[in-house]
Amino acid sequence: MMESAPIDDVVTSALVALAGRLRTHHDAGLARLLTEDTVRWFLIEELLAGGISSAGVKTEVPVRHDGGRLDLVVHGRTGPAAFELKFPRDASGAADTMAVGEIVNDLVRLSRLPDYEPCWFVVVLCDRFAGYLDRRPYWDWPTVPGAVMTFNAADFEKMPETARRSAHRRDGFEALVATARVVEPVGFGTLLAMHVNPG
């Protein structure tokens, strides 16, 4: 069965339900067992519950222009939606800056996918790392639904060297705009989901 509601509505409802499942795991003392793959599987289950056809769900989908893979692609009535998911571990120091570079990689990739609409970036953040992202000088990290973040080629130079080394997908990149659509507490932090578009 294909979804009857617009895919954005189905995805939004699935993300809110996903956050609820993460809260349940936190409350049961199981948050330490969660992984990025777990988050992806929970999201897939919620999308299927929302009416997305199982035949329209694909993981690890190759991206032609950069040789990488999308974490998740979902085919709805109006075409495919792309997802990149991140669940950075609660570390500090170099691990923080490397995680920033990986986040930028995903955002840049999503901003350059003309065959996919919408493009979603979904990240589960512990409170400490969310605060770290919010204090970075190269963006206005979104913390409430509707908040808009811009990032352009010049912002790479404001990043720490470790982050720049991790953010290696920038050839030909100009700018992107990311708009927060879902911001939900998960007990140990926050689930943030953004639409990503070219700047």
Image (tube, rainbow, N blue to C red):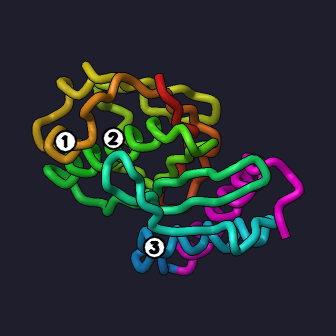
Residue 104 is marked as 2
Q: Residue at x 35, y 23 (%)?
A: 174
Give the residues drawn in magenta, as a range: 1-28
Q: Which residue is drawn at 74% across and 55% down?
A: 76
Q: How far apart are marks 2 and 1 (CA)?
A: 9 Å
Residue 31 placed where, x, y %?
A: 46, 74
Q: In which quarter of the image is the N terminus?
A: bottom right
Marks 2/1 in contact by CB < 8 Å: the verdict is yes
Instruction: Please give the residue where the numbered disc 1 appears in the rendered image.
Output: 163
Q: How crowded is mark 1: few (under 14 residues within 10 Å), some or many (20 or more)?
A: many
- What amino acid type is highlighted by mark number 3? Asp
| Disc nearer the start of the sequence (3/1) | 3
| Disc nearer the start of the sequence (3/2) | 3
Residue 64 placed where, x, y %?
A: 39, 51
Q: Residue at x 51, y 68 (%)?
A: 59
- The reply to whether residue 190 is visible in this rendering is no
Secondary structure at numbered mark 1: helix
- What amino acid type is highlighted by mark number 2? Val
**Left or right, 92 with reference to 22:** left
Residue 15 placed where, x, y %?
A: 65, 57
* Position of 24 relative to 177 (above/below): below
